[in-house]
Image (cartoon, rainbow, N blue to C red):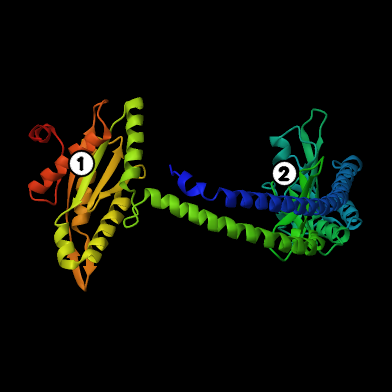
Amino acid sequence: MWNLSDSFGGHRTSVLALVIGFVTVLLLIAITTTSLGLHRNNLIVDHQTRLAMLNGHIGQQVAQSISGAQQLLKGIASTLPLVDAKASEINERLVALKSNDPQLMDLLILDRNGEIAYWTGTGTPPSVKDRPYSSIYREQPSTQVWVGEPKLSRVHQDQWFFAVSIPVRSPSNDVVAIMVAIIKTDYLRDVLMQLVDDPNISASIHHSNDKVYAQINRNANTGPKLSLTQELRSHPLKVTTECEYQTVLSSYQDIQLWASLATLVLIFCVCCLTLLLLIRIRKQARLSIEDPLTKTLNRREFMRRGDEELTACQRYDRSFSIIMLDIDNFKAVNDTRGHHIGDLVIQAIGKILNNQSRKNDIVARYGGEEFVILLPEATAEEAGMAAEKLCKVIRTLKTRANKQVLQVTASLGVAQWHAPGEELASVIERADRALYQAKALGKDQVVRCDKNIEGDA
């Protein structure tokens, strides 16, 4: 956690003035936004009402079309002598009925097996046993009227239709025939063209499974749209109308433009002041906890966070480990290559530690060329493995200096906190002893603090 009290205290008056100005701007924004919002909502509600009325008119026309077909089929079932009459007479009657109804593509009478017995077509009728209207009454005996999905005709080339059918049942409730009206989907499109006279409104009639019977698409753009869908009460069809929000809000946009420009000027002024202040506060806060050269934590912040971790470990019976790292022969680098090159090496090591550490590890520059890492909930074995990995990565580090490649190594010491009464400084000291043991053993290696090192100390 950053401590901003020192940097913030000298700016209280500026912040207070900024807050007052910001609140004033917020009030202006709130008033402008509320007014614009009310105007916008009124426009949307008006268009929604218009779309709802249009949906109602389209739905009523479609329902009348289906109900008309249903009544026609019932009339055929009740008046035609299906048993005694000749097939040619029944077909002629069906053709006459079809010619009087512009929405019909065909009329069919299926036998109990689902095959066409009579129809308005010529020649041999196609097999329709795979059509749902042929089998629906056997699969769902309670069905009285069935309205099908849009299908491509097998008789009329490139023409789409949907079927409306009713069963003819015997006294024992067995299906003896199925009356089918084949309705052109183009008829529904004609209904849409007749009722939707606004060039900005698109409309569609589709099945409950979203398969489209007919549609008119007048929205060339792919932007957001205001859409309204209404389901037909007695049939599995839905009517959807929509128009682009850009069209709905065309009268709103000019008002919004000028109001937004005025508001944006105020927002810009506030944002500039806020940004400058936040940059200053953040910079001061960062400098108070971060080492400017390596972008790791500084020693003071490390100790503060380390004490917090130690307290948490004592409370929740956890442990942590410390890795101490020192760059080998760093004084020689400074003496032979210069302090600038030494700084580049330290920066590179700091970058490696930041990149290789876990998200919850605490990495800091402890002083000079020495770094420290606190690994929460890590045993000495786990910390040792992490240290070995760091040692290997640093060994492969290549720093360019005066057109030459400089390679460095590091020695690392590891210690684990395991005694509830042990202070953080004590763990760091044990890790430091392990580090110096690594130096004594030839550098470029990891030594873990154990009883031998503690005893030697």
Q: Is residue 4 visible?
A: no
Name the residue nearer the viewer: 442 or 227.
442
Name the kind of residue labelled 1 in the image: Gly
Q: How many angstroms separate mark 1 from mark 2 (CA)?
A: 76 Å
Q: Quadrant of residue 96?
A: bottom right
Residue 444, given in percent of the width and then of the height, sits at 14, 52
Q: Quadrant of the C terminus?
A: top left
Q: How many marks?
A: 2
The label shown at residue 384 is 1
Q: Quadrant of the N terminus?
A: top left
Q: Nearer the viewer, mark 1 or mark 2?
A: 1
Name the residue nearer the viewer: 314 or 65.
314
For the residue labelled by badge 1, is the local secondary structure a helix, a strand or a loop?
A: helix
Give the class, few, some or many, for how many residues have Cα within 10 Å of label 1's Cα (few <14, many ≥20). Answer: many
Q: Quadrant of residue 268?
A: bottom right
Name the kind of residue labelled 2 in the image: Ser
Side of 327 where 23 appears, left or right: right
Q: Residue furthest bottom?
A: 403
Q: Which residue is mark 2?
A: 134
Position of residue 291 relative to residue 448, above or below, is below
Side of 442 where 184 appears, left or right: right
Residue 282, given in percent of the width and then of the height, sits at 47, 52
Position of residue 385 relative to residue 426, above or below, is below
Side of 307 where 330 appears, left or right: left
Side of 19 where 455 appears, left or right: left
Marks 2 and 1: in contact by CB < 8 Å? no
Residue at x 14%, y 57% (from the top left corner)? 329
Of pointers 1 and 2, the one earlier in the residue sequence: 2
Q: Is residue 250 visible?
A: yes
